Amino acid sequence: MARMKFLCDAERCIECNGCVTACKNENEVPWGVNRRRVVTINDGVIGAEKSMSVACMHCSDAPCMAVCPVDCFYRTEDGVVLHDKDLCIGCGYCFYACPFGAPQFPQAGAFGMRGKMDKCTFCAGGPEADRSESEFKKYGRNRLAEGKLPACAEMCSTKALLGGDGDVIADIYRERVTRRGKGAEVWGWGTAYGPGKPGAQPPAAGGKS
Amino acid sequence: MRPRRMVVALLAAAAAVFGLAACGESEQVVVYTQGKYQGKPDTKPWDNAPLAYGGNDWTKGDKASWEKQINTRNLGQNEYRRIYNQ
Amino acid sequence: MLTRTHLAGWCFALMALVAPSAGFAQAAPGSAQQQAERAATQPGNNAPVWREVRSGQANYTTAQGREAGVLVQSSGDTWRQIRNGPITVYGGWLVVLVALAIAAFYLVRGPIKTHDRPTGNLIYRFSVVERWAHWTLAISFCLLAVTGLTILFGKHVLLPVIGYTLFAWLTLLGKNVHNFVGPIFMASIVVFFLIFVKDNWPSKGDLTWIASAGGLFTGKHVPSGRFNAGEKSWFWMGVVFLGIVSSVSGLVLLFPNFEQLRLTMQQAHVVHSVSGILFMTLSLGHIYVGTIGIEGSYQAMRTGYVDESWAKEHHELWYEDAKKQGANRPAAGGGAVPAGAAQARRDE
Ligand code: SF4
Ligand code: SF4
């Protein structure tokens, strides 16, 4: 059975924000709401900069679902965590609980006026009729119901962001890792066997990976 | 009268305490009944007909064929196969 | 079911939620440097980067939004465990058990009646301003309590009964009531404090009163001033202390527009729900003695008047004072003896 997952390869992400743009365009999310974002660690430090694209990770034991006072979340059979905006009261609890900062709100007003929560749906829409106008307005495109995968992962230029059945993307990633290098270049080699030749260089630009 | 009331009160207390034990965390299981996931309505993706364009292919209502379609599509994210092996 | 390990886990979780507030957003020094070195000696080993990610510090991002640069925050799940664990479970038990204990007490002991026959002589106990202050506080408190309980326990108690749509609608209404009544409650605490503080200063007889629990169990008569030690404890521990704690933590939660960190909100929520539950628990006692527990006390706050024999039995020292000052006539601006007061007298 398919269990939908995202995976971001920090070795590949080039912080082009293409996934962010794809998401915004595909789902026509309002201003101020970012279902996906790219975070760069050690920005500008040569040899240390890594970027990661992050959105809702569709947790198997989802903190958002656990704290929601109106229990508006549900997990679908293919492992996608969705929510019902008609039930949401905009309390913000899911945002406090989520490890990845995925839940977003159209406002952050005084007296706790936030509006309905919005988050990545793994391009799976929501409770409204699939591929209907009202579903699109509230939750964005339902690509799973179109036989497609999330727009962000499908258009990622470097294929850093993978999205789909957890088993399949794990296989893709495994294959990638085994091809990434051999000998001292292979992932984890240095950790397992210590440094190679003194003063060894990181893989040259334009190399594999 | 008095002792009976006490018994009722004690039973109510016991019921309340047992009831509360169920509070806190609920199991996050997937239950799909009558078109609803744990009370929230949703349709399964494979219960839609494939789009007329885009080369999608599955039988409406057949989960296995939809999964096959998704898996084929998923392999498009593996450029080693998509570019070199085809 | 709830083992010691659970408890230890929760304590640990609580500590984890409190601890990071001290050193939040402190960049691990030289972690970029470490990563650069690591990449040279052990290519592909990104451990320093992942350590940095797990530290919860903010990194660079083009996305706008609160803490958008934080890739992973660990305190959220900790907060979830505290909220869904001890706060929901023990908090729920506390409220229910205290309510049941009071009910049991009522069944066993019954209402505390005035021993002497009412004299028919009414004494003015609460002015109009005092009653307004009390009822504004009381009604807003009850609204906050009911809506607060719905947000914490409704999912487990009400939702299975009334279903998703109705429950979500009610909770949305409740959330807005909670948010807009909150400030009224805070303001009325201030007013209430200013009005009643002078009669709530601890005085000589208080210790004796506490030692005999106000004669609640023995039925023995303990003299007290305008307010007895029980009322004073409720005033200081409930209205003043818990009132301030709930108000301050509530304000943090009420105005998310000041870009508070999620950790701040989680901590404020824990403080707010714990103080709210304690507040409600204490209030149950006050509401009990103020209504069915002690005959004549509800009428006092309702109409402002008490019967002479009630005053003598419950607040003897105050009664003596009041008699000296001739308070059995309505104070200036107090108006005539309301119809309700006469009614109350007949009921007795
Ligand atoms: S919103 Fe956050 S907590 Fe909920 S499933 Fe997505 S990543 Fe997990
Ligand atoms: S904001 Fe909405 S989805 Fe999030 S916890 Fe509150 S009610 Fe649930």
Image: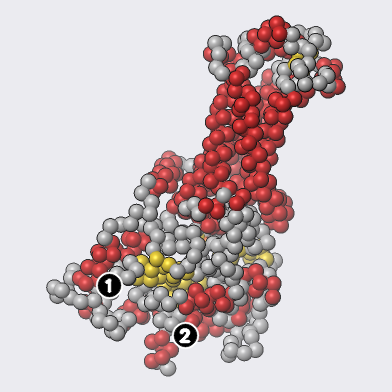
Q: Residues within 10 Å of mark 2 (few under 14, many from 20)?
A: some
Residue B30 visible in the shown view: no
Residue that label 1 marks: A47
Q: Nearer the viewer, mark 2 or mark 1?
A: 1
**Circle 2 SS class:** loop
User: Do the dots labelled 2 and 1 sit on one chain?
Assistant: no
C236 relative position to C303: left or right: left
Residue C52 in percent (x, y) is at 34, 61
Q: Is residue C164 above or below residue C89?
A: below
Residue B23 in percent (x, y) is at 58, 46
A150 relative position to C72: left or right: right
Q: Is residue A111 above or below residue C186?
A: below
- State the residue at coordinates (50%, 85%): B72
Q: Is residue C130 above or below residue A144?
A: above
- State the residue at coordinates (53%, 75%): A23
A187 relative position to A102: left or right: left
Residue that label 2 marks: B76
